Image (cartoon, rainbow, N blue to C red):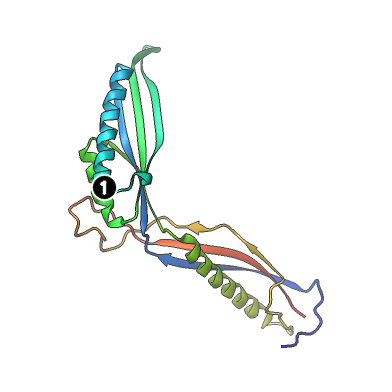
């Protein structure tokens, strides 16, 4: 198709958005143990026993060792305050593990198993997809079509001809939404804490520049 000579300053800039909703296929759980004792050694020993039991139980369940890693290990002194005075009362040991699970139906079971072994914190459950880039590329295609539709709508109201080939595209970062619970829990058949994965929205936003004459 022939397009008349385009004058460089005759430009139109539009945004485009694309969204893909997908079911997650991975989950990252942060869980662990916090122990408080007067003696640091006692706090560490108790914490070590709990975390060792949790690790053994998770590995026995089939979670690969490489999918479990320590993300927090802290030792903090504890104080009480009375009449403006600081009074030492012991130590807190905080050991948190991040567990990546490829079978999301095990989510509730993993939480319950860890708690049964002495874990007393579950600070984060994050559902993800193993291949987000593939879904993001689909969202990009939708975003480009969205931008072109906007450009067509705008220029169709004017006596001009739009060149459908963009001369510049600006891409923004990938964005994912937090999971939204399903009405029907995916873990309903499991005898475990009912944690719903929901869906993840992967979106792309672009700015597209077109020429017209």
Helix, strand or loop under label 1 = helix
Q: Nearer the viewer, residue 2 or 56?
A: 56
Above-or-below relation of 169 to 116: below
Task: Tell me which residue sits at (60%, 77%) in the image.
Answer: 149
Q: Quadrant of residue 39?
A: top left
Q: Dividing the image into 4 quarters, which one contains the N terminus?
A: bottom right
- In percent of width and height, residue 12 lies at 71, 72
Q: Which residue of the protein is positioned furthest toward the bottom in this rendering? A: 1
Task: Tell me which residue sits at (28%, 20%) in the image.
Answer: 42
User: In the figure, is residue 211 to the left or right of 143?
Assistant: right
Q: Nearer the viewer, residue 21 or 32?
A: 32
Q: Which residue of the protein is positioned furthest toward the left in this rendering? A: 191
Above-or-below relation of 209 to 99: below
* Disc 1: CA contacts within 10 A as few (<14), some (14-19) or many (>=20): many
Q: Quadrant of residue 124?
A: top left
- In percent of width and height, residue 110 lies at 26, 47
Above-or-below relation of 100 to 74: below
Task: Tell me which residue sits at (61%, 72%) in the image.
Answer: 147
- In percent of width and height, residue 53 lies at 24, 35
- In percent of width and height, residue 150 lies at 61, 75
Q: Nearer the viewer, residue 21 or 87?
A: 21
Residue under label 1, please give it.
110
């Amino acid at each position: 198709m022939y397009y008349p000579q385009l004058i460089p300053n005759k430009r139109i800039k539009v945004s485009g958005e694309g969204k893909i909703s997908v079911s997650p296929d991975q989950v990252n759980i942060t869980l662990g143990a916090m122990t408080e004792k007067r003696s640091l050694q006692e706090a560490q020993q108790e914490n070590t026993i709990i975390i060792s039991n949790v690790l053994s139980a998770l590995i026995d369940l089939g979670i690969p060792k490489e999918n479990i890693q320590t993300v927090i290990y802290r030792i903090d002194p504890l104080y009480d305050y009375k009449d403006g005075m600081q009074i030492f009362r012991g130590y807190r040991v905080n050991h948190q593990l991040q567990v990546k699970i490829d079978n999301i139906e095990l989510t509730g079971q993993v939480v319950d198993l860890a708690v049964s072994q002495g874990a007393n914190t579950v600070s984060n459950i994050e559902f993800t997809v193993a291949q987000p880039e593939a879904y993001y590329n689909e969202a990009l295609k939708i975003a480009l079509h969205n931008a072109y539709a906007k450009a067509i709508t705008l220029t169709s109201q004017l006596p001009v001809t739009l060149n459908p080939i963009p001369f510049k595209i600006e891409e923004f970062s990938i964005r994912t939404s937090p999971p939204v619970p399903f009405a029907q829990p995916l873990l309903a058949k499991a005898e475990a804490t009912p944690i719903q994965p929901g869906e993840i929205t992967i979106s792309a936003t672009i700015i597209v520049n077109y020429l017209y004459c």
